[in-house]
Image (cartoon, grey):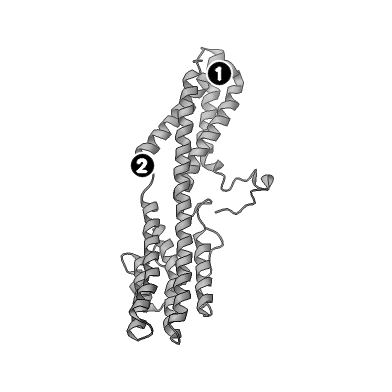
Amino acid sequence: MIQYDPHRWFDHFFDLRGSLVREISGRVSLCAVWTVMVVTVHFHWYPLAIPPLLHTLVGTALGLLLVFRTNASYDRFWEGRKLWGGIVNETRNLIRAASVQFGADREGLFELTRWTAVFPYAVVSVLRGEGGIGPLASQLKAQELTTVSSAQHVALAVASQMTATLDRARRAGQFSDIIYATLDQNIQQLVDYLGACERIRKTPLPFAYVVHLRRALVMYCFTLPFALVSSYGWYTILDVLLVTYVFFGIEEIGVEIEGPFGTDDNDLRLEDICETIHRNVYAIAGIEQAPRESMPEEL
């Protein structure tokens, strides 16, 4: 996700990165070239103008479809952000309570903190279809790393290790069954957030809606010159260029933000969130962070 100051217009007004201009430039340029051909034929060979009423009516319906598309995509984006906010809160709550309940068992607390810091990185790997558990792999023992990495679901394997750590402390008499159930409830909530993120990732907008919208958008934009040429003449080229830039841009925004867990410019900065969790849980537990591999600067 690109950080910017919304009050400073001209600091980002001409930016290309993240603005999706590159993504839609091919479609917009093709419409512009097609418009040049239509206008040229209309004025030099054969009149091609049609009444604009149809495009006025269809344009209204198309605008509503585009609004729904972007609203649905933004709902997915914002829900993803809320879920990751929940992951941040639950990891903090887990270690905050565990740092008191583990008492003098610093080794057990360190193990739980380590697995808790690994969990969000494992979630990122699952959501992006990658292998491994990210840059904190170096903090795990060889056997632990092998066990988790070879699991069918890496993030669930890490969550199981967190629960196993609590269970060992319970059996060692560090806290009661009630405290164990309370702490494990935080882990269950983390798994629930993971499942909700997977739901967003694995359930795109309905295929029929997306296909129909794109077909309607292409037909509208490529027939628009016929409706405008009699009124605007050669200015039709500029008019179509503006309309197609707006319409294709809105549709592409919906595509960009409907899957917020990737590495696009407008996706969530998951690495930053994971790093925040990493720092927070170690600080809450009063444990010095172990050296680890360097993080990428940006998504």
The foreground one among 212 and 16 is: 212
Sequence-wise, which precedes: disc 1 or disc 2?
Answer: 2
The residue at the far front in this view is 178
280 left or right, relative to 176: right
The foreground one among 248 and 26 is: 248
Please provide percent x and percent y for residue 291. Answer: 52, 77
- Vertically, is 80 above or below 286? above
Residue type at tag 2: Pro
The foreground one among 72 and 129 is: 72
Label 1 neighbourhood size at 10 Å, few (<14), some (14-19), many (20+)? many
Label 1 – label 2 distance at C-alpha: 36 Å
Q: Which of marks 1 and 2 is in front?
A: 2
Please provide percent x and percent y for residue 2. Answer: 58, 53
Q: Answer yes or no: do the residues labelled 1 and 2 have beta carbons within 8 Å?
A: no
The residue at the far top in this view is 46
* Residue 262 visible at all: no
Res 229 label: 1
Residue marked by disc 2: 206
Please provide percent x and percent y for residue 297. Answer: 56, 62
Res 208 label: none
Residue type at tag 1: Val
The residue at the far left in this view is 152
* Residue 15 visible at all: yes
